[in-house]
Image (cartoon, rainbow, N blue to C red):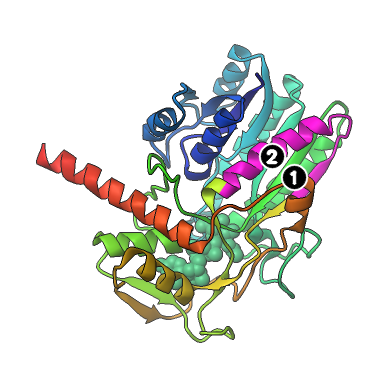
Amino acid sequence: MAKILVTGGCGYIGSHTIVDLLENGFSVISIDDNSRSTAYAVSGIEQITGKKIKNYKVDLKNFDETLAVFQENEDISGVIHFAAYKAVGESVAEPLRYYENNMIGLINLLKCVQEFDIPYFVFSSSCTVYGNPDSIPVTELSPVKKAESPYGATKQMGEEIVADYTKTDGMRAAILLRYFNPVGAHPSAFIGESPVGKPQNLVPAITQTAVGKLPKMMVFGDDYPTRDGSCIRDYIHVCDIARAHTLALQYLVDNKNKTTCDIFNLGSGNGITVLEAIHTFEEVSGVKLNYEIAPRRPGDVVAIYANNDAAVSELGWEIKYDITEMMRTAWAWELKIKAAEEKVKSN
Ligand code: UD1
């Protein structure tokens, strides 16, 4: 049973990916400093899968501690790297913190991967690398535009670092996965997205407003050149994203004589407006959402969605969840958090 190291395993996409890996015969260890996550996710993973995983509470910026994890686990055969900061606005306010965390973490990790000759590496990237695209849907060959934020720049640089690394001597194959907008939660509602502080992303803003944690939410702009004036994005269920990581590892193993650095878009291929997303949520939950139209958010692109043909044909990726299921599972997760919080209060 191949052992995979997942960094950021307590985070949103990391935890869902661990579930998929465990359910498909891999064994997993995690590194997560829990600066933006809690170890609570580990118990959720264990409840879903009935399997134990170990999380090392290590900051990847600390090279010696990172190396020690590899020394203790000499049988790691692949690495999936999620651990990074991802808030666009925060990255504009604190660029040095973003460059330090996202770049040093990646470099320290790759130094260990090189030292221990680990052949397979999967990197969490983002559609943010396409910036404001000239035409949609975007394919993997669409041009990478100047980054709109330091966060976006760390993803672009990260992709280049990984690509250059795979060109060095040795068995080094990597996949860069460009996520569109991952949303929703595991259907069991044992794991989901737990944003720190006020949510910046659309779906947590919707569910937290609906549950009453936020008094109302803002729709950033209704004067864009789209069918209803709000921005278009490609929402994709987090379990479908997770599945693609297992398939990516399998693809690297199956092509083991190739030292490549392949890129795949992970989006549904459907563009949905912010208002359409809100209305789908209202239908699914039966809750009327308190929202207000606000000015455009700086840095937002007008419209982007994926051409996902490469992931479908090369990785054998099948998308299982539609926007209704995305909203249904996100809502179930929010209600689960609410019930847990009420239980704590009443004790
Ligand atoms: C962006 C990046 C994505 C990155 C993510 C990390 C792009 C195209 N996408 O996603 O790669 O991984 O940040 O956070 O660069 N919205 C509201 N009200 C809210 C929140 C959001 O109207 O309270 C709108 C936004 O204006 C946007 C849409 O909802 O039009 C989606 O926003 P969000 O969920 O933050 O994701 P992106 O900005 O698309």
Q: Report the residue marked by disc 2.
A: 247
> Which is the main secondary structure of the residues drawn in magenta?
helix
| Residue drawn at x 58%, y 55% as measured from the top left | 151
The reply to whether the residue tagged 2 has its Cβ within 8 angstroms of ligand 1 is no
Bounds of the magenta segment:
240-263
Indicate the position of residue 309 as horizontal and vertical percent values. 76, 58
Q: How many other residues sit within 10 Å of disc 2, few (<14), some (14-19) or many (≥20)?
A: some
Local SS, label 2: helix
Q: Report the residue marked by disc 1.
A: 315
Local SS, label 1: helix
Give the residue type that dot 2 points to: Leu
Horizontal side of 165 relative to 133 (left or right) equals right
Occupied quadrant, residue 106: top right
* Mark-to-mark CA distance, 2 and 1: 6 Å
CB of mark 2 within 8 Å of CB of mark 1? Answer: yes
Give the residue type that dot 1 points to: Leu
